[in-house]
Image (cartoon, grey):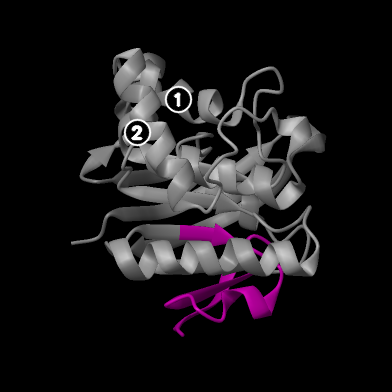
Amino acid sequence: MAIIEAQSIHRRFGEGDLVAHILKGINIKIEPGEFVAIMGKSGAGKSTLMYQLSVLDTPSEGSVIIDDVDVASLEEHERTSFRLRTLGYIFQNYALVPDLSARENVMLPLLMKNLSWQEAKQVAGTAIDSVGLQGKYENLPAELSGGEQQRVAIARAIAGKPKIIFADEPTANLDSVSGKQVIDLLTELHRSHQHTIVMVTHEREYATNCTRIVDMEDGRIVSDVPN
């Protein structure tokens, strides 16, 4: 059974003559354990689609069902709780809190899930170790390279054991070496833990290890094939 099912998704922004119709009737199913790359040129609608699938935005029309939950039926506080419980996020700008250490950044969503400080600290340390940043627990984001900051973001995404990880252009701000390290890390997470991963990228080489490639153009899916 699909872990994500989106039906007839439309997303419009603006009003009247200024409406921008970004998504135009998207239908997509994603099965548990898939590593899906959503690709397309700038403006194709790939990040907008990911925001609908990841419950960070609400479609203008259509439905999104995740893990058997119709997310449109949830109140805002229920959506927040659902995201925290079920989903993990990796953004292109890392989205780390600058005044918190690497470990504290990873602890933050764990504390929001009501883990004790000591338990959150232990889980965060294990997650940071798993992304190869042993000894960087107390570093502030400004004391880390871009690649290291993104690895902290990955640690934060996986620490709570989400059912689905969403990665929006996770290599966009990285050099080629750091970008490959991040993709290799996501690939290993998928292979070793069978995480369901949905990744937006415009770099075809970074989709090599994905199990499926979805190509978008002008707000529509134009190709959806196994890789």
Whether 91 is drawn above or below 104: the answer is below
Whether 31 is drawn above or below 142: the answer is below
Cβ atoms at labels 1 and 2 below 8 Å apart = yes
| Mark 1 and mark 2: Cα distance apart in space | 8 Å
Judge from the rendering whether residue 197 lies leftward or rightward of residue 146; answer left or right.
Answer: left
What residue is rendered at 65% in x and 64% in y? 201
Q: Which residue is mark 1?
A: 107
- Which image quadrant for residue 184? bottom right
Name the disc covering residue 12, or none: none
What residue is rendered at 66% in x and 40% in y? 94
* Segment colored magenta: 198-227
Look at label 2 and name its amino acid. Answer: Val
Among all residues in the image, which is located at the extreme front? Answer: 135
Q: Which residue is mark 2?
A: 123
Whether 74 is drawn above or below 180: the answer is above
Q: Position of residue 14 (x, y in %)?
A: 74, 32
Residue 129 visible in image: yes
What residue is rendered at 70% in x and 52% in y? 147
What residue is rendered at 37% in x and 45% in y? 64
Q: Using the image as rendered, state which of residue 31 and residue 115 is in the foreground.
A: 115
N-term mark: 1 or 2: 1
Q: Magenta stretch: residue 218 in it? A: yes
**Element type at marker 2?**
helix
